[in-house]
Amino acid sequence: MRTLACALMFSASLAALAQQKAILLHDAALVDGTGAQVRPHVDITFRKGYIDSVRPAFTKDAPKNVEIVNCTGKTVIPGLISAHSHLGILLDNATPSPNAYTTENVTKALNQFERYGVTTIVSLGLNRDLVYQLRDQQREGNLGGATILTAGRGIGVPKGAPGLDVAPDQIYRPANAEEARKDVDEMASHHVDLIKMWLDSGHGKIPAMDPAVYTALIEEAHKHHLKVAAHVYTLADAKSLINANVDIFAHSVRDHVVDPGFAQTLIDHKIWYIPTLALDEAFYLYAEDPAIMKSEFFQQAAGPELLAKLQAPDYAEKTMAAAQTEQAKKDHEIAMKNLKTLYDAGVSIGFGTDSGAVPGRIPGFTEHRELADLVSAGLTPLQAITLATGENGRLLHEINSKLNVGLIKDGYSADIIILSADPLMDVHNTHKIDAVYHHGVLVPNPAPQN
Ligand SMILES: [Zn+2]
């Protein structure tokens, strides 16, 4: 269905690209996103937005007609990809508002993602139809920031999930299977990149989606060759969705510990699993570990309004006493355990954070936190970075076969982060951003290193 060519899926200005000389990153340590070990002393050349060559660093004569950027002692990784984020839900990262989905506010978030090295995001539902225009403007080179893929509004439940304060045209809530099919058709007519649905009864407190509705919407999406990502919480719901041919779990299973049999089912059905480990943690992280808020890296991402909320005198005490905190901690622990089980079994694991959905899940910052959480769950820094780059690129390529992102390899979009410290020694070194290139163009004002 997606007949629009997506070759121009980038946000850099066309004029800037046309004028651009080839750029050669010289003598970098390369983590290429495939999961391969670091390669020392590498030259990476890119032009017109795409990677041209990756070869051993020149030692004698420097190539001519290229701009050489010396990267001795630096590590180069692909731009990060979030396959689960949101736009236009919060004002100033701090306040949910049905009026937040504006060009100005969305652009601000896209720029923030990009400054933090997140060069591509999937805005996984809760978008106003404005998103389609913004995506087109990006493709024409007239809108900056992280590249957007979108699930449009997404499909929720009448009086049920998602329980967020958004405008009525940010979500469909079909009453029956027939309405759900129409909603999918409408989104397909806008060339959404995928379909998002919510299946969750909020611990039995709100109505869950009727199986007839999700069965129909998944079937309809597949007619349009669109994948379906489901918000999920319980193992029972996950199993029902597998039977209905869902493609992507947008969150971890968090009510039960999963077993290798469940992992095998995901593998057999080629289902992607996006753990969003940072999601539950964001409810209590800043109360439990206020030191995390000291860095400029954090403060610039949070912004003054959110910072004031999180640093209010009673915030920590109130948060730690809240019933939600106890539940979130339990959920986080199970999510971490399940991720490790599924990763070890060989399930396809995506990378996403739910950043932008609620205050505390902060565009750009939370993606780096997710990397650290993956390491806390038992992955190596290399494995964590691979999920956020090459593996997520593989997921996006399945969604749109014209999109080649997530690897530092010939023909891929030149989305690149230069780090001044080795992220494989300590995953927190992904904060040490020296420079970000997005589709070959240097991003102004990258995130502060400390
Ligand atoms: Zn979400």
Image (cartoon, rainbow, N blue to C red):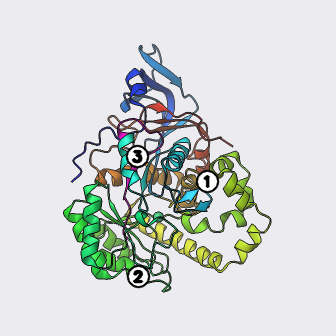
Residue 362 lies, with reference to residue 12, above or below; the image says below
* Quarter of the figure with the C terminus: top right
**Which of 446/369 is in front?**
446
Q: Which residue is mark 3?
A: 134
Displayed quadrant of residue 228: bottom left
Q: Mark number for residue 92?
A: 1
Label 2 CB less than 8 angstroms from ligand 1: no
| Left or right of residue 10, residue 95 in this image | right
Q: Mark number for residue 208?
A: 2
Residue 379 lies, with reference to residue 389, above or below; the image says below
| Left or right of residue 275, residue 185 in this image | left
> Gap in Å between the C-alphas at discs 2 and 3?
32 Å
Please report the bounds of the magenta region as a residue range: 139-155
Are there few (<14), some (14-19), or many (20+) residues within 10 Å of tag 1? some
Q: Residue at x 43, y 26 (%)?
A: 16
Mark 3 or mark 1: name the one nearer the start of the chain: 1
Residue 89 percent coordinates (x, y): 52, 60
